Amino acid sequence: MIDRRPALIARCTGTADVIACVNFARAEGLPLAVRGGGHNVAGSAVCDDGLVIDFSGMKRIEVDPERRSARAEPGLLWGDFDSATQAFGLATTGGIVTHTGIAGLTLGGGIGWLTRRHGLTCDNLAAADVVTADGGSCRASERENTDLLWGLRGGGGNFGIVTGFEYRLHPVGPQVLAGVVLHAAERAPEVLRIYRDYIATAPDDLTTIVNLRKAPPAPYLPSDLHGRPVVVIAVCYAGSLDDGERVLAPLRRFGEPLIDLIRATPYTSHQGMFDASVPHGLHYYWKADYLGPLDDAKIDALIGHAWQAPSPMSYTILFHLGGAIRRIDGSTTAFEDRNAEHALNINAVWSDPQTTEGHVAWARTFWEAMHPLSTGGVYVNFLGAEGQERVRAAYGPDKYLRLMALKRKYDPTNLFRFNQNIPPVPERP
């Protein structure tokens, strides 16, 4: 989907390299993009005729089990992060795909399997080392440059280039009660209504994700299910295994599932469950929104469009939010819309570039049906290249103005603009 050719790619090995790149790009008037994990659907990690800072070689991580903290470099992927922290029985909220980069996920918010128990990834960002647009470097923490830390907690890469992240960790695993239950798509009206009622009283230890799709040829699914339209309910219980069995029993008893694969499993294994569904090298087009509770109108709209996708690789995800996200004071982060019940991600996936138009049309038509039923907000990490109005929707009017003021302070010339951009001054109509 993205075809851009930079003039130069700098494979940085440390902060000094990043400072040199920033100074060079500014002096030469070059566009400047930053590549962390390379997982960005908007393609903002690469620019035409400019300089790309490539962090793929900066993947060091240091875990302090006594302080329950970890310091990590921006090229690290979540699979490597989790392997390092789980050696000590610790984790923080990460993505649901192991090859997601820690940097982009954190700076845009961070939804994952531990979200309802421990908050967003950005809520667990304790400090960051940052290279600023003037070529300087500073530390943002809860004691120094607190305004910058606020912006980094959800405001994206608008204010500087983070060369080091410090996270708070929590006891997790090493085993969690997790997995999937599959129901036939023809039972979706009943299944989604039962699911809606079930999650209304779900404890914070339980995070669930609904996936509406054709069953993929995943090794953990029987071959006779491959390609069949299904409702996938994926779960992760972050508390004790015994408590999880009791909490999940009503969900597992309902109806006649095609398969129940919920079991005690290593947290790191569960983190990689969806990896095979999102490989590199395919075409991806996303549309997204926040939703309130699943009333009948939303359920009917979801059912009416989800399985109309022209590609068997496409899917629609509903992330159940709430829990710790809602309990955390929203004024402490740039992340917005903590009262949303679900994050919706309509994901068109295909391989043949000659068929792009039809796949994009499906996602857009689906989104147009859902958007009037949304909260009006959107998770910024799920945005493609959709324009300034959608960026404003991700932050709301008050936080957007505050972010613009922060941008004027740290990047008045908008050097860092290859992102979901917040300009230092209002755009001309």
Image: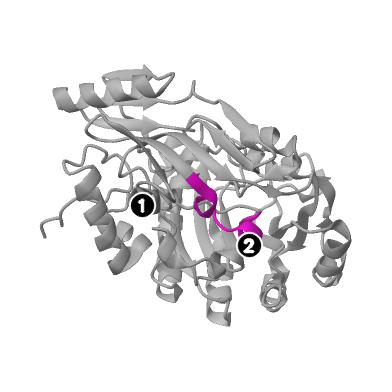
- Residue 171 among those drawn in magenta: no
Q: Residue at x 50, y 56 (%)?
A: 346
- The magenta segment: 114-126
Q: Secondary structure at mark 2?
A: helix
Residue 5 is at least partly visible in this image: no
Frontmost residue, 31 versus 74: 74
**Label 1, residues with CA under 10 Å away: few <14, some 14-19, many ≥20:** many
Q: Which residue is mark 1?
A: 151
Q: Is residue 50 above or below residue 65?
A: above
Quadrant for residue 249, please give it: bottom right
- Which residue lies under the disc numbered 2? 116
Residue lying at the far right in this picture: please name it: 242
Residue 223's x, y, as percent?
80, 43
| Residue 55 locus on image (x, y percent) | 44, 26
Residues packed near mark 2 inside 10 Å, few (<14), some (14 to 19) or many (20 plus): many
Q: Is residue 18 above or below residue 206?
A: above
Q: Amino acid at mark 2?
A: Arg
Q: Say which quadrant the N terminus sits in.
A: top left
In the rendered image, residue 124 lying in the magenta stretch gets the answer yes
Residue pushed farthest bottom? 296
